[in-house]
Image: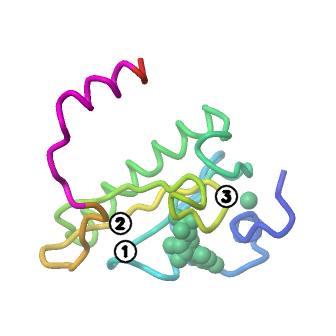
Amino acid sequence: MPETDCIFCKIIAGELPAHKLYEDERTFAFLDVNPGSRGHLLVVPKTHAADILTVEPADLAAVATTAQAMAKHVKARLGADGVNIINSCGAAAWQTVFHLHFHVIPRYPDDGLVLPWKPAPADQGDLAKLADELR
Ligand code: AMP
Ligand code: ZN
């Protein structure tokens, strides 16, 4: 069911313009209008789901499969050296459009994109406690 006021549902229904790249029974892929790199695209399920926590597993599997295919495609067609596949779940995690999407972001040498965190070694005791909490 399309969700009223969901821009990605409107794109899928053809009610809003988009540069569609691919579609199949369950998924739809189109260019991101604010690209982080050349070829940055989004893969979404056709059935509305707000995020990765609530999407039907079969739709999630289909989105992952399409994201893999699109990652191969942009590598081959655009000569990308790598690809980031990114999902944001929840406003605290930078999600701004609440229809599940995987970003497929082709990567090029010196494209200027940077990791959003500074990797630094954690305390091993803290990691052990955390692992206990999560098991
Ligand atoms: P996120 O911030 O992870 O929720 O990603 C939402 C993405 O949707 C952003 O990268 C936006 O640039 C992109 N976006 C928003 N509106 C449109 C649109 N009408 N067509 C294509 N991409 C869009
Ligand atoms: Zn939607």
Q: For the residues marked 3 and 2, what is the alpha-carbon distance in whole angstroms? A: 18 Å
Residue 48 in percent (x, y) is at 74, 52
Residue that label 1 marks: 39
Image coordinates of residue 45 in percent, x first then y, are: 63, 50
Q: Nearer the viewer, mark 3 or mark 1?
A: 3
Q: Could you tell me how far apart the alpha carbons at marks 3 and 1 are, in whole angstroms?
A: 21 Å
In the image, residue 107 sits, relative to residue 125, either above or below, namely below
Tell which circle, 3 or 1, labels the residue nearer the N-terminal end: 1
Quadrant housing the C terminus: top left
Assess whether residue 124 is covered by the magenta stretch: yes
Q: Helix, strand, or loop for circle 3?
A: loop
Front residue of this view, candidates 76 and 133: 133
Q: Which residue in the structure is indicated by mark 3?
A: 99
> Which residue is located at x 63 percent, y 49 percent?
51
Image coordinates for residue 106, horizontal then vertical, percent: 30, 67
Q: Residue at the spot x=60%, y=68% of the render?
A: 96
Sequence-wise first label, 3 or 2: 3
Q: Is residue 6 visible?
A: yes
Residue at mark 2: 105
Q: Residues within 10 Å of mark 2 (few under 14, many from 20)?
A: many
In the image, residue 120 above or below residue 7: above
Q: Residues within 10 Å of mark 1 (few under 14, many from 20)?
A: many
- Determine contact: label 3, label 2, CB under 8 Å: no
Viewer-side residue, 20 vs 95: 95
Residue placed most toward the observer, 113 or 58: 113
Kind of residue at badge 2: Ile
**Magenta region: which residues?**
118-132
Dominant SS type (magenta): helix
Q: Is mark 3 within 8 Å of ligand 2?
A: yes
Label 1 with label 2: CB-CB less than 8 Å = yes
Determine if residue 20 is in view.
no
